[in-house]
Image: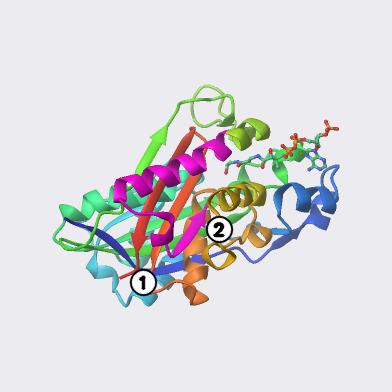
């Protein structure tokens, strides 16, 4: 047996808050439609802040909560699809800013909104082979940079933010039972890049993603519970990717999850992509809803298509 546990969490969001009323001044929409169809009331968008500034804010908070100094970190993985630069990676920039050791792997990983769970699983593997037993995992996205402001069904959804976790690897810890998957599809959710079309604008068939998510979320929960030989009642808290309040509500209803065992912050943040799950973890920790000994089941899904679930404990 060996695995990772969460030691500290942190999050950071840009100062500027965009309300639904602000959205009505940009596109043909209304407050009632946005709130009832998505659960979103506000989202944070960068003005002067860089992606790196959000990463630094979240990472420092997580290190402080964990009581770990940068020189104890054995690897740094940033899940993102919107770094400031392709090279250096966001993780390399963070290594420089935080003064992380120079002899550790630091790199970015893109699994869209599921990225944080892919990064956690990657970190578990990296730390098993590292002499340093603490790792820094981030999810950070600045989706306001790639919003298509002429598409009213997607531009109202996304916010910017970063979430971070310091994890500890130990031979006696249980694995996080990560269950991850992909199905390559460039029609349902697409962001161009430095390839053939060179247009970094987000396009999404919302209804198709919705249908995919409603099927993927319970599948991930079931897979993680089977892999870990646990039941719904063994889970202290459920953390869902915050893409649409209705997707969370459907999962909660299916499993009869009581209100004290799940959390929604989509009304404040909107969909922050890879940052969504770690921001929830950090807020829950701050609120005292989860802490040492808590067992948390996280579920994510997003572009790629990608999906995943993982069961993690706080040390
Ligand atoms: O993290 C990545 C994963 N992404 C997601 O999980 C997104 C999942 N999908 C969704 O959350 C929803 O599909 C959306 C919120 C994107 C859209 O909600 P919907 O209920 O699927 O709406 P729709 O696209 O079917 O559109 C319904 C109606 C249409 O009008 P008609 O044709 O019925 O007259 C749209 O034109 O709502 C209209 N509409 C809007 N009206 C006011 C679409 N966007 C807006 C808007 N304001 N912003």
Q: Nearer the viewer, residue 61 or 307?
A: 307
C-alpha separation, residue under disc 2 versus residue under disc 1: 18 Å
Does mark 1's beta carbon lie closer than 8 Å to ligand 1?
Answer: no
What residue is shown at x 77% (from left), y 36% (from top)? Answer: 150
Q: Nearer the viewer, residue 98 or 284?
A: 284
Q: Which residues are magenta?
A: 212-240
Q: Using the rendered image of the protein, determine whether residue 277 is visible from the camera's viewpoint.
A: yes
What residue is shown at x 22% (from left), y 51% (from top)? Answer: 126
Name the quadrant of the C terminus.
Answer: bottom left
Which disc number belongs to residue 63?
1
Ligand 1 is located in which of the four quadrants?
top right
Q: How is the image coloured?
A: rainbow
Q: In the rendered image of this protein, does residue 67 appear above or below residue 270?
A: below
Asked if residue 218 is among those painted magenta in the image, a careful observer would answer yes
SS of the residue at dot 2?
strand
Which disc number belongs to residue 117?
none
Which class describes the residues within 10 Å of circle 2: few (<14), some (14-19), or many (20+)?
Answer: many
- Magenta-highlighted stretch: main secondary structure? helix
Instruction: Measuring from the top left, give residue 112's x and y in whole percent.
Output: 49, 41
Instruction: Measuring from the top left, give residue 10's x and y in whole percent.
Output: 45, 68
- Classify residue 29 as left or right of residue 60: right
- Classify residue 305 as left or right of residue 93: right
Instruction: Measuring from the top left, give residue 232's x and y in whole percent.
Output: 43, 55
Residue on which the image places disc 2? 161
Asked if residue 275 is among those painted magenta in the image, a careful observer would answer no
Instruction: Measuring from the top left, give residue 33's x and y in whole percent.
Output: 82, 47
Q: Earlier in the sequence, mark 2 or mark 1?
A: 1
Give yes or no for contact between labels 2 and 1 (Cβ–Cβ under 8 Å).
Answer: no
The quadrant holding residue 73 is bottom left
Q: Using the rendered image of the protein, determine whether residue 54 is visible from the camera's viewpoint.
A: no
């Amino acid at each position: 047996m060996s695995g990772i546990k969460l030691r500290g969490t942190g999050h950071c969001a840009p100062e500027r808050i965009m309300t639904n009323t602000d959205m009505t001044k940009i596109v043909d929409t209304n407050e009632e439609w946005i709130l009832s169809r998505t659960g979103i009331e506000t989202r944070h968008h960068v003005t002067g802040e860089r992606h790196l500034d959000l990463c630094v804010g979240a990472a420092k908070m997580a290190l402080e909560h964990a009581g770990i100094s940068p020189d104890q970190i054995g690897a740094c993985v940033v899940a993102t699809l919107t770094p400031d630069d392709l090279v250096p990676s966001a993780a390399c920039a963070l290594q420089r800013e935080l003064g992380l050791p120079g002899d550790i792997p630091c790199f970015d990983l893109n699994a869209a909104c599921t990225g944080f769970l892919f990064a956690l699983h990657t970190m578990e593997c990296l730390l098993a082979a590292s002499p340093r037993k603490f790792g820094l995992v981030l999810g950070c996205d600045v989706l306001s940079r790639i919003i298509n402001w002429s598409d009213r069904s997607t531009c109202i959804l996304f916010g910017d933010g970063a979430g971070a976790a310091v994890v500890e690897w130990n031979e006696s810890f249980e694995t996080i039972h990560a269950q991850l998957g992909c199905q390559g599809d460039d029609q349902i959710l697409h962001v161009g890049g430095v390839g053939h079309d060179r247009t970094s604008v987000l396009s999404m068939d919302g209804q198709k993603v919705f249908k995919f998510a409603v099927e993927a979320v319970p599948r991930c929960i079931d897979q993680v519970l089977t892999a870990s030989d646990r039941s719904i009642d063994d889970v202290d808290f459920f953390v869902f990717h915050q893409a649409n309040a209705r997707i969370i509500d459907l999962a909660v209803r299916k499993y009869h999850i009581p209100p004290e065992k799940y959390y929604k912050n989509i009304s404040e943040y909107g969909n922050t992509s890879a940052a969504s799950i770690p921001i929830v973890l950090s807020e829950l920790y701050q609120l005292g809803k989860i802490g040492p000994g808590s067992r948390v089941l996280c579920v994510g899904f997003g572009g790629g298509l990608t999906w995943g679930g993982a069961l993690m404990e706080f040390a």
